[in-house]
Image: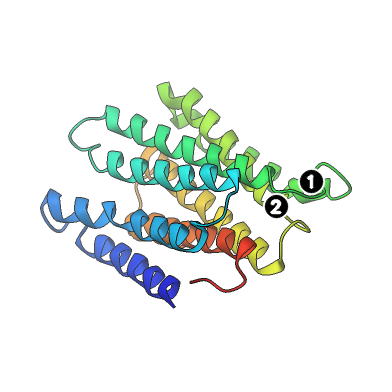
Amino acid sequence: MKTRILALLCLLTGLIFMIIDNRTSFPPQMIAKALIMPWLMIIFILNLRHDKNRLHLFMFAGLFFSWIGDVLLEFTEFNEFMFIAGLAGFLLAHVMYLITFFSTPGKNAILGRRFYLLIPILVFGLAFIFIVYKDLGEMRLPVIIYAIVMLIMLSASVNRIGKVNRTSFLMVLTGAILFVISDSGIAINRFIHPFGFSTVLIMSTYIIAQLLITVGYVRQFREKEV
């Protein structure tokens, strides 16, 4: 029950941010965005605080670095360097997630007979880089590195198939896909062509992604959340 309430609070906070973004002064929208990830951190702590598993540390670090990325990106309008710093935060979040997912005990799927599951990810990655490459300028190398790490994270979520229960697998996989969609939206909006309702698309997919990844990971260890 507590998990459901906290999940709703996370979604509500995200909705408030999307509504007031660019419509109000800096502090309110900053506070709203800074509160999104803490709800998920509380979900994580409440459900897994008694479990002694080193993977929990990496997973929680992913949530923490995501929060850092959220906060730093809000300062981009004041200092362009904050965009790079924010990307670094999300890059570290992806690294923490991919370590967590790849380290899930069990037989690896994408390194065995199910390697074909990587084909859609590779196709998407090549298409994405082809689309944004010429418009990246001096950000070319950082963005390509980020995209590679992001897609490895997605591949790691696919690799959990057969290692965890179906609910946990599907929730984390869906979350990873939405995370990639959100990050791709940021790249297109910033480097190629700004588009209407970009905040709604980017933030809605991002918030749902993080919620699914968090609750999906908890479901790997808890059939019923607190």
Q: Please, is residue 82 above or below residue 173 in the view?
A: above
Residue at the spot 41% in from the left edge and 32% down from the top edge: 88
Q: Position of residue 134 (x, y in %)?
A: 49, 29
Task: Identify residue for label 2.
Answer: 158
- Residue under the image location 25 percent in, 43 percent down: 74
Q: Identify the residue position indicated by label 1 in the image.
A: 110
The outermost residue toward the left is 25
| Crowd class of label 2 (few under 14; some 14 to 19; many from 20; radius 10 Å) | many
Instruction: Inspect this view and state whether residue 22 appears.
Output: no
The answer to which of 185 and 133 lies nearer the viewer is 185
In the image, 184 versus 131, the foreground residue is 184
* Residue closest to the far right: 113
* Residue occupying the point 58% across, 35% down: 149
Do labels 1 and 2 touch, CB within 8 Å? yes
Element at label 1: loop
Q: Secondary structure at mark 2?
A: helix
